[in-house]
Each structure stands twice: as C-alpha cells, then as structure tokens.
Image (spheres, helix red, strand yellow):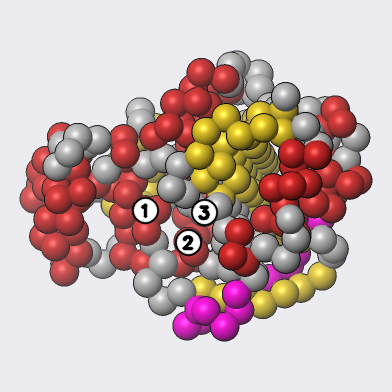
Amino acid sequence: MLNEVSPFGTFSPSAFQSRIIALARSFDPGPFSKLAASVGKRLIFPSLTGPLDLMTWGVKTRIDPRRNVTEKRLMFSPSRFELEERELLQRELKAGDIFVDVGANVGAYSLWVGPLVGARGKIVAIEPQPSVLARLRANFALNPDFNVQVFACGAGDSNGAMILSVGSSNEGGASLATVSGGADQVEVAVRPLISMVEEARLERIDALKIDIEGYEDRALLPFFAQAPNSLWPRLLILERSEKDWASDLMGALKDYGYRITFSTKRNYVMQLA
C-alpha cells in the first residue's frame, strides 16, 4: 500500500550532505549548475549508502541517486530538470485535471504535477522497474494529499510478460525495446495503455508524459487505435526515441491532429490542434 513507508526524515541528510546539496542547488538552473552538480556528486557519492529525504519543488521526496540519472538531477539540480516541459505543465494544468505518467520512474513529473492538479485531480503513474517502483510508491506515500493510482507494469500492445533490460548505471533507463542493452534483466508484466486508463476510470486525459526508452510507439499507437477521442490527451510529452521505434509514430500522431508545440533535446511536446 502507498502508506506503508517510513516517515519523512527517516533518511535525513547529514549536516555535510545538506550543505553540499544546498550549495549545488543554489547554482540551479544557472550556467554553473552542471559544474556544481558534478562537484556535489564527487563529494557525496563515496559515502552515500542509501536514499536521502529532501524537499524538492516544495514536496517531500526520497531520492537515491546512486544508480539513477533522474534522481541525480532531482538531488542536485531540480530546477534544471526538464524545465521547459514543467513550465508548460504549470501553465496548462489546473486543479481537478488528470495526468498520466507512462514510465514514471521515481515520480519526478508526477511530483511536480501533484500540487498543480490537487486532491480533486488525479495522477495515473505506470512503472514496471521494481527498484524505482519502490521509490515511486514511497514518494507518493510521503505526499498523501495527491490522488494517485499506480500500475506496476509496462505499457505495450497486449497483455503478457516481457523482459525489461536495466542498465547498471541508470535504473531509470530500463527498456523493453532494447533487451540486449542492459546489464540486468527482469521479467515484468505488460498491459495495453487503454486497459489501464479504463481501469482507472478516466473520462479524459489533460496531459500525458511517456518516456519508456524506445517503446513509446508500441504503447501509444494501439491506444489511439482503441481509445475514443474523448480520451486523447490534449497535451503530450513524448521522449525522442525515433531510433528504436518500429513505426512512424510522429506521422501517426500528426494524422491524429497533434502538432509540435516545441521540442527539446529529450522530448517532443505536442498538443491537439
């Protein structure tokens, strides 16, 4: 259950760790942010043995950055993390809105969205990777005012089980698309996105973020083929993984009426025309 987690502060950083993290964050998101984060990692990582409890964007977070790039960013440079995408979500989402986070990792996007949509809104978070899933659940449990439903599985084109490839240096980069690319492999459940949306009883989706390391086409195309137009997200944040897609996902999305609002190094941001 989401509430079965040790209280916030159980993993409080030491005075030294707090000073280093605060110093790194003080440069964020300025021109020296990357350098400050790099120095912070070199100073903290050698003695880091587990997660740390930190306030991030005004919400409680339990972060273990040793094998997860996303958590490194959240610890040392949260303001720089997907800044343009978060600013757009802040402008577009309001209390009562619905957000679907496919490939939620430890919940970075969802934790940002939680205060925007409030208790009257809803977050659906989908994450199959066991170790980051545990921290995702912990982060939600530490913020009980969020209305969240977690699906512990991957999103694909059918029900079943698949092998998830997990990189040794980045657990958050686990992929169903490139099984040979990870040092560790784990079997996970996979479900069609439409089945999870229906189980969550969503009547609409105000924004959907999908970052599943090259499997985006196999999750989204069946969804759009089966879902009524009322469930099509009005805002879509899509990881740029064209090299791993088996289909022309961008062409299909444009045919469905989506247009690119802007793109970053990591993502396409699209809205229904």
Marks 1 and 2, Cα distance to the nearest angstrom?
9 Å
Q: How many marks?
A: 3
Query: On the rendered structure, is 269 left or right of 215?
Result: left
Q: Which residues are magenta?
A: 178-193
**Disc 1 secondary structure class:** helix
Image spot of residue 172 (x, y percent): 48, 61
SS for callout 2:
helix
Q: Earlier in the sequence, mark 2 or mark 3?
A: 3
Query: Does the stretch in magenta take in 234?
Result: no
**Residue 89: where, in percent of width, then height?**
52, 27
Q: What is the x, y in percent for residue 214?
A: 61, 62
Query: Relative to residue 204, is residue 91 depicted above or below?
Result: above
According to the image, label 3 marks what residue?
Answer: 105
Q: Earlier in the sequence, mark 1 or mark 3?
A: 1
Label 2: few (<14), some (14–19) or many (≥20) C-alpha neighbours in 10 Å: many
Separation (CA) of disc 2 from disc 3 = 6 Å
210 or 188: nearer the viewer: 210
Q: Amino acid at mark 1?
A: Glu
Amino acid beneath label 3:
Asn
Which residue is identified by label 1? 71
- Labels 1 & 2 near each other (Cβ < 8 A): yes
> Cβ–Cβ below 8 Å for labels 2 and 3?
yes
Q: Is residue 260 visible?
A: yes
Horizontal arrangement in the rendering, residue 148 relative to residue 205 (left or right): left
**Is 57 left, or right, of 128 in this rendering?**
left
Label 1 crowd (10 A; few <14 / some 14-19 / many >=20)? many
Residue type, numbered disc 2: Gly
237 in relation to 158, above or below? above
- The span from disc 1 to disc 3 (Cα, nearest Å) is 9 Å
The residue that mark 2 highlights is 172
Q: Are marks 1 and 3 in contact (CB under 8 Å)?
A: no
| Residue at the spot 14% in from the left edge and 50% down from the top edge | 35
